[in-house]
Amino acid sequence: MARLHVLEHYRGFKIPETTDYDKFREWMSNVLSHPSVKSTLQPKEKIIQAYERYANCTVRNNWYKNVFPAGSDSDEDWTEY
């Protein structure tokens, strides 16, 4: 649920404000207000910052090196996906 902030921040996605999603919003509110969630939930800004490299396709880790070995098309612009 907290990651919905990431979708909104980087992709402009929001849960629609229609009655079709009332039950979802109620469920999400209940989950986010639960003591075990509240005590472990990171601030919205910290979550957004943690996902920045992924959202902007700038992550470079071991997985990336295995999937896109040197000399491959690793410079392809993945931001359009």
Image (tube, helix red, strand yellow):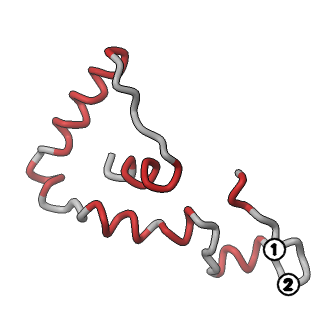
Using the numbered discs, state the Cα–Cα distance from disc 1 to disc 2 in whole angstroms.
8 Å
Q: Are marks 1 and 2 in contact (CB under 8 Å)?
A: yes
Return the residue at label 1. Answer: 74
Q: Is residue 1 above or below residue 68?
A: above
**Residue at horizontal 64%, vertical 80%?**
60
Return the residue at label 2. Answer: 70
**Residue at horizontal 27%, vertical 21%?**
23
Front tag of 1 and 2 = 1
**Residue at horizontal 39%, vertical 47%?**
4
At numbered mark 2, what does the secondary structure look like: helix, strand or loop? loop
Give neighbour class at mark 2: few <14, some 14-19, many 20+ (Cα, 10 Å).
Answer: few
Q: Is residue 37 above or below residue 60?
A: above
At numbered mark 1, what does the secondary structure look like: helix, strand or loop? loop
Foreground of the two, 44 or 26 = 44
Q: Which corner quadrant of the image does residue 27 belong to?
A: top left
Kind of residue at disc 1: Ser
Q: Is residue 57 above or below residue 79?
A: below
Q: Tell me: 31 left or right of 56.
A: left
Q: Where is residue 70 shown, x and y percent of the image?
A: 85, 84
Q: Tell me: 38 left or right of 16.
A: left
Q: Tell me: 14 left or right of 26.
A: right
Q: Which corner quadrant of the image does residue 18 belong to?
A: top left
Give neighbour class at mark 1: few <14, some 14-19, many 20+ (Cα, 10 Å).
Answer: few
Kind of residue at disc 2: Ala
Q: Where is residue 79 shown, x and y percent of the image?
A: 68, 59
Q: Residue furthest right?
A: 71
Q: Is residue 23 above or below residue 66?
A: above
Q: Residue furthest left?
A: 35
**Residue at horizontal 12%, vertical 45%?**
34
Q: Where is residue 16 shown, x and y percent of the image?
A: 40, 27
